[in-house]
């Protein structure tokens, strides 16, 4: 059985980082799909279900809450495990998401070891993690001078 993952985030860099963490954990790159928002994710899930959904909450078009509600009430997606990766976490948010069968709420930027522990706790079919700890994939920082027009640089 092939383990498949769908990453949903409107920020390309966050999707790239989540993918890099998954690949470092032993998930084949070909088993990871990406969507920029919930509506795009639903379209991809209708084409091919995923074993694991990793989603942000705050996105345009269709946010993570709407996506989670949609899959919660769709029989085909009942087996899809769910992890939320968000900039702000709280006990009340985790409780709300628990009602949508979210297995873990992780804080951005995503940490590979934390993601690995969350996935290992799910005991998903086809999931065979690599042995040992996973080094976190750092979020790149952008030099502010690199984005200024030449005329405005000192």
Image (cartoon, rainbow, N blue to C red):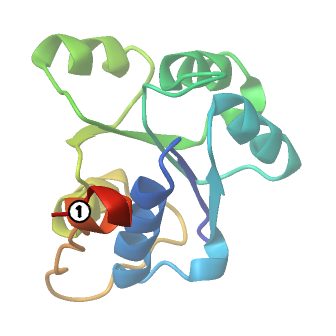
The outermost residue toward the bottom is 131
Q: On the rendered structure, is 105 left or right of 54?
A: left
**Location of residue 11 with respect to 1 vertically, above or below:** above
Q: On the rendered structure, is 60 left or right of 88?
A: right
The x and y percentages for residue 36 are 62, 43
Residue 95 visible to an observer of this rendering = yes
Which residue corresponds to the image point at 39% horizontal and 31% vertical from the top-left? 102
The x and y percentages for residue 97 are 35, 19
**Quadrant, the N terminus:** bottom right
Q: Which residue occupies the foreground of this view, 113 or 130?
A: 113
Which residue corresponds to the image point at 24% horizontal and 34% vertical from the top-left? 87
Which residue corresponds to the image point at 26% horizontal and 53% vertical from the top-left? 118
Instruction: Determine whether the residue tagged by mark 1 lies in a helix, strand or loop.
Output: loop
The x and y percentages for residue 117 are 21, 61
Numbered-mark total = 1
Residue 2 visible to an observer of this rendering = no
**Quadrant, the C terminus:** bottom left
Q: Which residue occupies the foreground of this view, 148 or 25?
A: 148
Picture quadrant where residue 73 is located:
top right
Q: On the rendered structure, is 101 left or right of 39?
A: left
The x and y percentages for residue 43 are 82, 39
Picture quadrant where residue 105 is located:
top left
**Location of residue 150 with respect to 109 vertically, above or below:** below
**Location of residue 41 with respect to 114 vertically, above or below:** above
Which residue bears the numbered disc 1? 153
The outermost residue toward the right is 47
Picture quadrant where residue 128 is located:
bottom left
Which residue corresponds to the image point at 58% horizontal and 42% vertical from the top-left? 80
Mark 1 is surrounded, within 10 Å at the Cα level, by few (under 14), some (14 to 19) or many (20 or more) other residues, namely few
């Amino acid at each position: 059985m092939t383990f498949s993952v769908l990453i949903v985030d409107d920020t390309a860099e966050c999707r790239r980082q989540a993918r890099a963490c998954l690949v470092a954990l032993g998930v084949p790159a070909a088993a990871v799909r990406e969507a920029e928002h919930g509506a795009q994710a639903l379209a991809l899930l209708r084409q091919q279900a995923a074993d694991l959904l990793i989603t942000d909450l705050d996105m345009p078009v269709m946010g993570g809450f709407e996506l989670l509600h949609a899959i919660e009430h769709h029989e085909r997606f009942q087996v899809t495990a769910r992890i939320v990766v968000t900039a702000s976490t709280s006990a009340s948010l985790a409780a709300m998401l628990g009602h949508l069968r979210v297995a873990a709420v992780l804080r951005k930027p995503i940490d590979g070891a934390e993601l690995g522990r969350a996935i290992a706790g799910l005991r998903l079919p086809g999931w065979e993690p690599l042995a040992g700890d996973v080094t976190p994939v750092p979020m790149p920082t952008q030099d502010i001078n690199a984005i200024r027009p030449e005329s405005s640089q000192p």
